[in-house]
Image (cartoon, grey):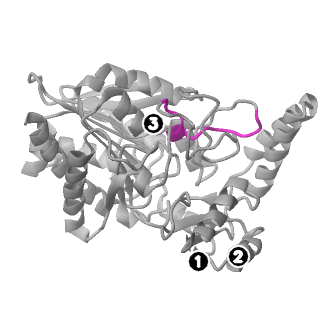
Amino acid sequence: MYVHTFLRKKYCKILLMQGKMKLASFCILASLLSFSSAVVRYDNYTLYKLSPKTSYQLKLLQNLQESNEHKLDFWRNPYKVGVPIDVLVSPEEKYKFEYVIGKSNVKFQVLTSNVQEQIDEESKVNNLRSLKKGELTWDRYYDLEHINSWLKKLAKDYPDKVTLIKGGKSFEKRDILGVKVSFGKQKGRRSVWLDSQIHAREWIAAPTTTFILNEILHSKDPAVRAMAESHDWYIFPVINPDGFVYSHTEERLWRKTRSDYGTGCIGTDPNRNWGYKWNEMGASSDPCESDYAGPHAFSEIEVKSLSKYMSKVANKILLYITFHSHGQYILLPYGHTRDHLDNYDEAYKLAKKAAKSLAVRYGTKYDVGNIGKLMGLITGSSMDWYKKNYQIPFAYAYELRDKNSFELPQDQIIPNCLEVLDSLVTLLKGADALYKS
């Protein structure tokens, strides 16, 4: 169904460009109706890991991504020789794709020959029907309703510590809910900002922020208690609520928002929509692409409204972290360059210490560097905008477990959260020391 929907949307866009408005309107309506009529499945979609070894092979992959002739879903941009990338390919395009890359001797590995099997297994383990509202257990992936119910319950149970926040609105009129946690009103207290789920399909992100929030309130570990009680916390588990809901109900691998600009294609990549160097590189101007930057910077109400809330508290923020998946990186600003700007050197040293702490429990290795170095040149991200606009002392983006897939097995949720919490303790201890000095 995904391929047919994709082709229909492309045809709608051609009609619009040709000025055939009546036909285009009918086409868009048919596309939207069919798109909402059934859950999108990925039966026999193949996930490949490709390793370009020459500049010619790299250019081939870049051209395949740009032309989208084979309707490929690149989970990593091809930007550097020797750096592996993951690509999802439909069954209709599989053999053509293998022929094209085989002709150029691009080495590849099949990670899974049927992505839907992973999704089905995840769904089977993830049954939420029997669970009480207002409770999270971190042994499965919770939907927006359960997460928001839990946030509201925390505010009710801990009125002296937890304040419910509406950080913004979504295109479909949902609130972007978060909490502020504070254990006192000491003068000069600095704040920490944590957010997640800007990309809908990256389901391990929200459990990470909610687990940290739970530990801030309940942990008896002395290091966690010291960290928790010496800072104020602004925590937003789901900042793309429409896309997140859609990924749970209709299309597991949906990435974008759900805004509609009448092009026949829905949504914008909210992490390409922020105002700093918007749409200069690493993003698409095509509304049908998963990394579409939007018609203009801050076009997405989620991005615009959340940025307005951040402006009210930014001068207090010591540490900003946004959680993504996958790849196992701790990323620093910026995405438009590989140069080391602002306080990169001290922030890098601190992130390296955090990555070392993260690896202690389970041996999980994270790479550290700026976006431009580790992900390729990409602009319009939330981290870059916050860092540049407010000069937040320490800003990071985590790309969480694992290295191959968005469907991280549920039995890895708690190990992921524990190791990230370990790294956060190290980050904040170091950030506090540097700030005071």
Image height check: is 52 above or below 65?
below
Q: Quadrant of residue 112?
A: bottom right
Distance from disc 3 to disc 2, alpha carbons, whole Å, reads 37 Å
Residue drawn at x 26%, y 71% is: 363
Name the residue carrying label 1: 108
Question: Is residue 308 rendered magenta in the image?
Answer: no
- In the picture, the quarter occupied by the C terminus is top left
Residue drawn at x 64%, y 58% is: 73
Which mark is first along the chain, 3 or 1?
1
Residues in magenta, as a range: 263-275
Label 2's element?
helix
Name the residue carrying label 2: 98
Name the spot of residue 311 as percent of width and height, x first.
35, 21
Label 3's element?
loop
Name the spot of residue 87 as percent of width and height, x first.
60, 65
Question: Is residue 272 rendered magenta in the image?
Answer: yes
Q: Which amino acid, by three-letter code, is at mark 1?
A: Phe
- In the picture, the quarter occupied by the N terminus is bottom right
Which mark is first along the chain, 1 or 2?
2
Left-right relation of 168 to 91: left
The answer to the question of whether label 2 and label 1 lie on touching residues, with beta carbons closer than 8 A, is yes
Q: Which one is in front, 173 or 191?
A: 191
Q: In terms of secondary structure, what is the magenta stretch mainly?
A: loop
Which mark is first along the chain, 2 or 3?
2
Residue drawn at x 37%, y 27% is: 389
